């Protein structure tokens, strides 16, 4: 269902209200009110985007977001009435593309979904012509036929960032990927690897700054 928007919300009246607004667009809404029904539906239908409430009966939205990200990059917008920063960051670090706080205007929700989809569609187009290409057999990365070799640690650092451009990864998440033996290292170790990796990527892309530090959060790969 290429134009479907999945609305996962246990407040039936609110879900129906959102569906009514989406029916006025080119997108077709589908409603699910219970967390346990989400994964099988997403796998079978591949929606264009998902509005995912955090507080749900059955599986909660955070666990669902985590599970969906294991098999799909579908845009996910987390919906929550819990507005503290920890919940917001947690949702985004799990791979969500945006968050919306209750109470909200249905018009704003539709606009936010459209904005995420425009960003995602644009990113897809860019990926075909202006993206890094990683070779995990040779530990190399190339850009417009310019290639550079990476160390094993540098490659494992870059891979999750390149797989999910624009997503913020914490130092802990990146180090967990870099060191599979779970060794204890200083958090600042990653800064040194980032510096070296940033220089190598810049050398093959005429000075393009791919790696962005996000103060207090971590790092992301910027297209």
Image: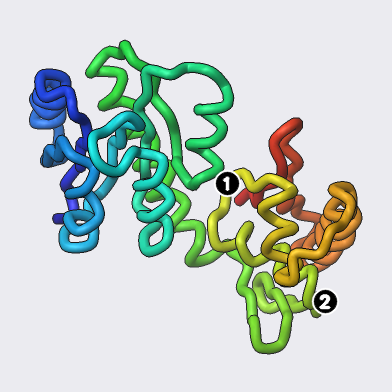
Q: Secondary structure at mark 2?
A: loop
112 to 7, vertically: above or below: above
Residue at 26% across, 27% down: 110
Q: Nearer the viewer, residue 129 or 22?
A: 22
Q: Nearer the viewer, residue 65 or 144?
A: 65
Instruction: Give left or right: position of 12 versus 99.
Output: left
- Does the image show residue 73? yes
Give the percent coordinates (x, y) of residue 99. 43, 29
106 to 160, vertically: above or below: above
Instruction: Give left or right: position of 166 versus 15.
Output: right
Q: Nearer the viewer, residue 114 or 194?
A: 194
Give the percent coordinates (x, y) of residue 82. 43, 19
Instruction: Give left or right: position of 130 versus 8.
Output: right
Q: Which residue is mark 2?
A: 151
Q: Which residue is mark 1?
A: 166
**Residue 34, image quadrant:** top left
Residue at 15% across, 40% down: 32
Counting residues from the start of the chain, the first of labels 1 and 2 encountered is 2
**Residue 7, image quadrant:** top left
Give the percent coordinates (x, y) of residue 145. 68, 78
Give the crowd class for mark 2: few <14, some 14-19, many >=20 residues within 10 Å.
Answer: few
Residue at 74% across, 48% down: 171
Mark 1 or 2, which is nearer the eye? 2
């Amino acid at each position: 269902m290429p134009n479907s928007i999945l609305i996962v919300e246990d407040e039936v009246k609110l879900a129906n209200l959102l569906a009514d607004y989406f029916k006025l667009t080119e997108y077709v809404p589908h409603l699910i009110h219970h967390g346990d029904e989400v994964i099988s539906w997403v796998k079978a239908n591949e929606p264009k985007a998902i509005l995912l409430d955090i507080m749900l009966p059955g599986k909660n939205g955070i666990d669902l977001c985590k599970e969906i990200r294991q098999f799909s990059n579908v845009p996910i917008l987390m919906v929550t009435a819990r507005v503290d920063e920890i919940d917001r960051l947690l949702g985004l670090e799990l791979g969500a593309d945006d968050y919306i706080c209750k109470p909200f205007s249905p018009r704003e929700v539709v606009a936010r979904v459209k904005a995420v989809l425009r960003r995602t569609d644009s990113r897809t187009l860019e990926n075909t012509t202006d993206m890094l290409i990683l070779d995990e057999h040779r530990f190399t990365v190339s850009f417009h036929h310019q290639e550079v070799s990476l160390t094993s640690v540098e490659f494992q650092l870059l891979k999750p960032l390149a797989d999910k451009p624009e997503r913020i990864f914490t130092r802990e998440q990146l180090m967990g990927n870099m060191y599979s033996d779970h060794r204890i290292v200083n958090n600042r170790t990653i800064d040194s690897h980032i510096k070296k990796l940033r220089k190598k990527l810049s050398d093959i892309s005429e000075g393009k700054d791919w790696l962005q530090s996000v103060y207090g959060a971590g790092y992301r790969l910027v297209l």
